[in-house]
């Protein structure tokens, strides 16, 4: 299993950053997402399920994304999602925002990727730690960039 947990400070109000994590804005922070369609419940609620299509290189992958946590208070925001990718990986992402001031937000991004079969486990073991770290940092910088746009 691969796990990560990173945090940065973003010079933007918490509500402005939080909007990026709403289902309707998913493509702003995840540009490879091709489609994000609601299947069950309502957008941005605990238990919501979406059909999501995502480009992995030139191949279009589709999977079911479930919102497993959703908290929206003035001082703290939290959203967690999980999905099964390619039948080989159980993926979980957790996003937490904390208000640091009127125009400053702490963004914490954590997650895990677990192989569900021997092939998935072997692929995770063979993967580059440096490449995974670069992917996490690139995502966090994309969030920071999008959050500070006017």
Image (tube, rainbow, N blue to C red):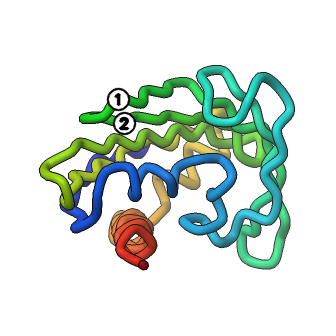
Q: Nearer the viewer, residue 15 or 95?
A: 15
Residue 135 picture quarter: bottom left
User: Foreground mark, 2 or 1?
Assistant: 1
Which quadrant of the rendered structure holds the C terminus? bottom left
Distance from disc 2 to disc 1, alpha carbons, whole Å, reads: 6 Å
Q: Residue 73 carries which label?
A: 1
Q: Residue at x 52, y 50 (%)?
A: 21
Classify 10 Å Cα crowding around label 2: few (below 14), some (14-19), many (20 and above).
many
Q: Which of 130 and 16 is in front in this view?
A: 16
- Please name the residue that numbered disc 2 is placed on: 77
> Could you tell me residue 4's position as x and y percent?
33, 48
Q: Which of 91 and 27 is in front in this view?
A: 27
Q: Which residue is drawn at 41% across and 45% down?
A: 2
Circle 2 SS class? strand
- Direction from residue 132 to residue 66 in the image, left or right: right
Circle 1 SS class? loop
């Amino acid at each position: 299993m691969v796990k990560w947990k990173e945090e940065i400070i973003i010079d933007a109000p918490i509500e402005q950053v939080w909007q990026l994590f709403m289902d309707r804005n998913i493509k702003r922070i995840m540009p490879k997402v091709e489609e994000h369609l609601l299947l069950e419940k309502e957008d941005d609620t605990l238990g919501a399920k979406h059909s999501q299509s995502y480009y992995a290189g030139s191949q279009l992958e589709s999977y079911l994304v479930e919102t497993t946590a959703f908290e929206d208070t003035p001082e703290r925001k939290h959203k967690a999602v999980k999905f099964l990718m390619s039948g080989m990986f159980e993926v979980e992402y957790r996003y937490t925002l904390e208000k640091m001031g009127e125009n400053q937000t702490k963004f914490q991004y954590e997650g895990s990727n677990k192989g569900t079969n021997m092939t998935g486990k072997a692929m995770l073991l063979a993967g580059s730690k440096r490449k995974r770290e670069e992917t996490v940092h690139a995502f966090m910088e994309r969030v920071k960039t999008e959050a500070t746009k006017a």
